[in-house]
Image (cartoon, grey):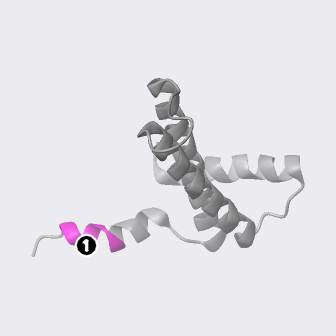
Amino acid sequence: MDIATLSARAVAVNRLYVEAFGVERDGLFLLGKLSEEAGEVAGAYLKLHGRARGSDAAPEALRADLAAEMADLLGFLLCLAAEEGVDLATAFEEKWGRYLEAP
């Protein structure tokens, strides 16, 4: 699935979330959720690698939790980019792709 399709799906899911919980969907909300999810990725990563409480769960469950938290993080990043009019594919290529350019 391409990034534009992922972005549209993330925004659609986020709209459902906003309606369900009655919150205002704006950049500040999305930034807060992005920060929250980054922390949850860190927690899931630490558990998976035996560096936090809860590390004794099944490795498959811990890996699935990390993947789910990474999906949440990506979803909120896509939503924030859409809210701010940022084309992430272009921004990524301009920022990271330049290191792959032939000299």
Judge the density around disc 1: few (<14), some (14-19), many (≥20) Cα neighbours within 10 Å.
few
Q: Please provide percent x and percent y for residue 55.
A: 50, 34
Q: Residue at x 51, y 52 (%)?
A: 42
Residue at the outermost right position? 22
Q: Where, quadrant-wise, is the C terminus in this rendering?
A: bottom left
Q: Secondary structure at mark 1?
A: helix
| Side of 96 relative to 74 (left or right) | left
Q: Residue at x 57, y 53 (%)?
A: 73
Q: Nearer the viewer, residue 67 or 24?
A: 67
Task: Please name the amino acid that badge 1 sits on.
Answer: Arg
Q: Residue at x 56, y 44 (%)?
A: 69
Q: Nearer the viewer, residue 93 or 27?
A: 27
Q: Nearer the viewer, residue 2 or 54?
A: 54
| Vertical position of residue 46 compared to residue 61: above or below | below
| Side of 96 relative to 42 (left or right) | left
Q: Nearer the viewer, residue 88 or 20?
A: 20
Q: Please provide percent x and percent y for residue 8.
A: 62, 52
Query: Which span of residues is magenta-colored?
Result: 95-100
Q: Please provide percent x and percent y for residue 84.
A: 62, 73
Q: Is residue 99 magenta?
A: yes
Instruction: State the residue position of label 1.
Output: 98
Q: Please provide percent x and percent y for residue 15.
A: 77, 52
| Vertical position of residue 57 compared to residue 1: above or below | above
Q: Inspect this view and state whether residue 17 appears.
A: yes
Q: Is residue 49 magenta?
A: no
Q: Inspect this view and state whether residue 5 appears.
A: no
Residue at the outermost left position? 103
State the count of labels: 1
Most frequent secondary structure within the magenta stretch: helix
| Vertical position of residue 18 compared to residue 90: above or below | above
Q: Residue at x 60, y 48 (%)?
A: 72
| Side of 86 relative to 95 (left or right) | right
